Amino acid sequence: MPDFFPMWVVITHFLNLFFMLLLFRSGFEVLSAFPKLYWNDDSSPGREWLRLSRTVHGADSRKPWSSSAEEEAWSPLVALPGRKNLGLGRHWHFLSIQFWILTGAVYIVMVVVTGYWHYLVPQHWSLFPDAIRSIGTYLQFQIPAKIPGEAFEPAQKLAYFVVIFVMAPLQIASGAAMSPTVLARFPWYGRLFGGKQGARSVHFVLMCAFAAFTVLHTALVVVHGLPHELALIVLGDPDGNRRLAIGLGVAGVVMILTLHVIITWFSLRHRRRTQRLLGLMVDPFERAVSRTFTSTQQFAPEDISPYFRVNGFPPPGDDYRRLAEDNFRDYRLSVAGLVERPLELSLGQLRTLGEQSQITKHNCIQGWTAVAQWAGVPLARLMEEVRPRPEARHVVFYAMDDKGLTEGEGRYGYYYGTIPIHLADDPQTILALEMNGAPLPVEHGAPVRLRVETQLGFKMVKWVTGIELVADLTDIGAGMGGWREDQQFYARGAGI
Ligand SMILES: Nc1nc2c(c(=O)[nH]1)N[C@H]1C(S)=C(S)[C@@H](COP(=O)(O)O)O[C@H]1N2
Ligand SMILES: [Mo]
């Protein structure tokens, strides 16, 4: 039998605590961007089972609203970094998760090779009644006895088993079921959780369970006798020097809290640097995902959502109004940059390039989803017409909405977005001209909007006026790869 408290348990336990706290706080940041939980992927306004916000936006509201108005500013005390920084919160979440999984993997390997799993994995059905008896013992304010020859009492063993072998894997699996690329490539995987909103809800409920476990676990450590347990957790030795244990334990907690204060302050104070630094770790992971998988979505007409949120207000100027009043007869789409044959196309000319229709699920980075049918020209067809030069690596889509006028909030400039050129060839990447069998409505991007079905919604530029092929993004906008990347510090990649 292995040691009851080997050093590798002490170390992985500490790292686990460290990364879990990062995951909790950055997870709250993500939740604050859309503090509503649903079981259904229509995510219809008003149908949420949990709403952590006072404001209500209704499907029948007379005043137009944009889904970004549903974002809440949560305090940096709970969220990392807080104050409406979804992009940075996601960076922290996706950074921490890599290390949390690594810690977990090391732990599991050690549990298996050392035989420690005997202490954690039920080997007999009697563990269940024994665990219930243990809980009864606690309720009588007594401490249940350990299983003979093992490290824990029965309820403890069962709780650890559930947390390590059931909750943690489910938490990772439900997290993966929220990636638009994973959902687009493997729709069946999303269905395991009842869709993206189901996965989001499960992820939230499990987070609550982890939090409850942490509180209970800490309380029971105190009940079991603090100095002794602390010596175990910190030194791996019940007879270790108690003063040293308390000193190290307190130092560990203070270190974690100080680090949280520092990274929160840094993230809020230096948002661009945080975006870039964390991007070094997070972007390659995202790129690998986006490169590997293409969308194979094909929903049924019955799946089309009754209500489809809008994000971003239409271009406010007279130019756009006149275009729209005239059914976009004077609209021209310019395609230029690193191409052999630049073009200016009217809607009629664009339409002659071909038509493709698809029923797909939209994933906004904030967290809402909706299903619609989109029809339009495959972007790959347009690329054949203009013939990109070999140096071209990104496709830039320029929009007609000046966000400084439509939204303000201290942000400025016309909306634009970019995709790596390989996404232009994906079978479900289209310039959509129709939605649900009718010409694209103004609020959803008339006359032309992009659909890239493996990506988050912010890549799918609406009110497209021009397309440019470029080798490098540094000279476009603020150089981060799109308006939301520039102004809201989102990651350039949008596959997760
Ligand atoms: N021009 C423009 N395109 C845009 C936006 C915008 O604000 N302006 N918002 C993006 C975001 S974040 C999302 S989720 C989708 C929303 O598409 P919808 O309004 O058709 O639902 O559009 C994307 N395209
Ligand atoms: Mo979005």
Image (cartoon, rainbow, N blue to C red):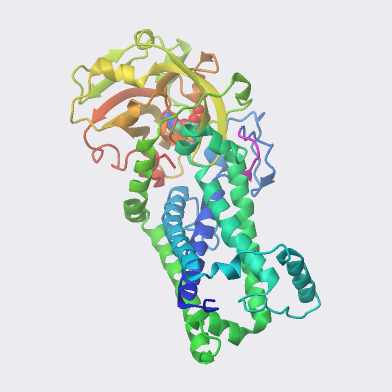
Q: Residue at x 50, y 50 (%)?
A: 84
Does 238 lie within the magenta span?
Answer: no
Q: Residue at x 42, y 12 (%)?
A: 355
Quadrant where the image shows the N terminus: bottom right
Q: Residue at x 55, y 61 (%)?
A: 78
Q: Position of residue 211 (x, y in %)?
A: 62, 62
Is 228 drawn above or below residue 459 in the view shown?
below
Quadrant where the image shows the C terminus: top left
Residue 145 quadrant: bottom right
Residue 407 visible to an observer of this rendering:
no
Q: Is residue 196 left or right of residue 110?
A: right
The residue closer to the viewer here, 33 or 151, is 151
Is 411 drawn above or below residue 172 in the view shown?
above
Main SS of the magenta part reads loop
Residue 457 visible to an observer of this rendering:
yes
The residue closer to the viewer here, 15 or 386, is 15
Is 437 drawn above or below residue 19 in the view shown?
above
Q: Position of residue 121 (x, y in %)?
A: 61, 64
Q: In this figure, what is the number of numbered marks?
A: 0
Q: Position of residue 48 (x, y in %)?
A: 67, 40
Q: Position of residue 231 (x, y in %)?
A: 54, 85
Residue 196 quadrant: top right
What range is drawn magenta here? Answer: 35-41
